Amino acid sequence: MAKAKVRYGAEMRKRADSVDRQRVAKYACPTCGKIKVKRAGHSLWKCRSCGSTFAGGAYSLTTAVGETGRRIIADVKKR
């Protein structure tokens, strides 16, 4: 599925395919909850239902660092 011709090994082709699948997938909107969020640009995501625009990862809506930060902020708000 990788658009670019990835060379030099099966592992690199698998990684490129994984990134492409994440990039074109639809994600759940944090605002309205519908699975309508698509990539609008590099790290820009837009919900096609409610029109909300989000900043996220380059190839997926959330990143591991972003999830960690979200948990820390939620814990601080609870206190």
Image (spheres, rainbow, N blue to C red):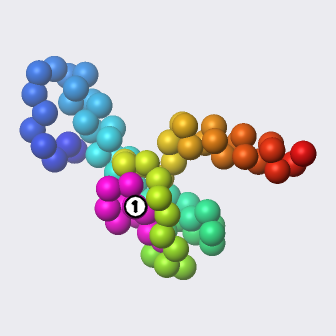
Is the residue marked by circle 1 packed among few (<14), some (14-19), or many (20+) residues within 10 Å? some
Task: Report the magenta stretch's main SS.
Answer: strand
Q: What amino acid type is highlighted by mark number 1?
A: Leu
Q: Residue at x 61, y 63 (%)?
A: 30
Question: Can you say whether 62 is above or below 46 in the image?
Answer: above
- Can you give x and y, in whole percent of width and height, for residue 40 in the image? 35, 66
Quadrant, the C terminus: top right
SS category of the residue bearing label 1: strand
Magenta part of the chain: 38-47
- Can you give x and y, in whole percent of width and height, for residue 47 in the image? 48, 71
Q: Residue at x 63, y 69 (%)?
A: 31
Task: State left or right for residue 20 relative to residue 56.
Answer: left
Task: State left or right for residue 58 relative to residue 61.
Answer: left
Q: Splitting the image into 4 quarters, where does residue 48 fall?
A: bottom left
- Can you give x and y, in whole percent of width and height, for residue 65 in the image? 55, 37
Question: Can you say whether 50 is above or below 15 in the image?
Answer: below
Residue 37 visible, this orientation:
no
Residue 57 visible, this orientation:
yes
Relative to the observer, which residue lies in front, 20 or 51? 51
Disc 1: which residue? 44
Q: Residue at x 9, y 38 (%)?
A: 5
Question: Can you say whether 79 is above or below 26 in the image?
Answer: above
Q: Residue at x 55, y 60 (%)?
A: 28
Specify the farthest residue to the right: 79
Within the magenta stretch, is there residue 46? yes
